[in-house]
Amino acid sequence: MIAESKNMTKLTLVIGNKNYSSWSLRAWLAMKQAGLEFAEVRIPLDAQTTHEEIRRYSPSGKVPVLIDGDLKVWESLAICEYVAERFAKDLWPADVVARAYARSICAEMHAGFQNLRENMPMDCRNRYPGEGMTPGVEAEIDRIFAIWRECREKFGTGGDMLFGKFTVVDAMFAPVVMRFVTYGVKLDSEAKDYADAILALPAIQEWVAAACSESESFAHFKV
Ligand SMILES: N[C@@H](CCC(=O)N[C@@H](CS)C(=O)NCC(=O)O)C(=O)O
């Protein structure tokens, strides 16, 4: 997947706690799936020094931020775009129509689903079955199922990801899969197949194992 493995500067991804930081997971997963080697700086998000620490790296004061030499790229979706453009073009579907669709979905995920974020914060290592469900969350979950179904039907041949092979879209939805597991959201068989495929990715298993070994524990952390 790596298009420019020569002349690569050392990449560093600054992230939050693996258990809680859903935006960090998106960028990290895209980079892992692109086969990139990169260093990680992990900044726990609940410490007194968190804000100051993040500001050392990130102009927005948020993680993730990717450092590539003198360049800083912040915002998870911008990081995915940069990684795709610079190192791994196949992080987007090759077909222009599929790619436009994929970008629309990524933008929708990046900008929306506020009810889900608020009520079902990512917490990879814990289980709260039945918690967090509200009418607003339910409507957003229905929208997610519709997106997944349409992607799999229209573009999913050739693999078990939303567009067949892994793309940025799967990176954007991976934290949603983690939330569905944590809160015991009932999935139909198609949605379950897709969720299982995400959970089976070695990179996801690596992330969850690291999340389980983190010592910080926040109550009701919403990221
Ligand atoms: N839109 C941003 C959201 C980034 C974000 O909210 N990051 C959280 C952690 S997941 C953060 O940095 N929180 C620390 C803070 O707000 O002080 C992105 O896509 O990267």
Image (cartoon, helix red, strand yellow):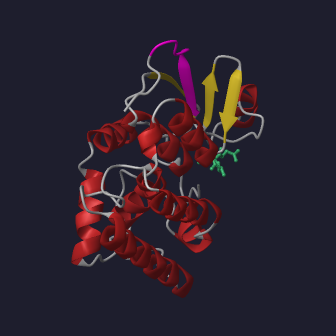
- Give above or below for 195 relative to 167: below
Residue 88 included in the magenta stretch of the image: no
Residue 17 position in % (x across, y down):
51, 40
At horizontal 44% and vertical 19% (from top left) the residue drawn is: 5
Residue located farthest toward the top when viewing the structure as drawn: 7
Q: Which one is nearer the viewer's eye here, 209 or 95?
A: 95
Q: Position of residue 163 (x, y in %)?
A: 36, 59
**Chain part drawn in magenta:** 6-14
**In the figure, residue 223 lies in which quadrant?**
bottom right
- Counting labels gives 0
Q: Residue at x 55, y 29 (%)?
A: 13
Q: Is residue 38 above or below residue 119?
A: above
Q: Residue at x 30, y 77 (%)?
A: 186
Does 11 lie within the magenta span?
yes
* x, y percent for residue 213: 36, 35
Q: Residue 18, percent across and down?
A: 46, 41
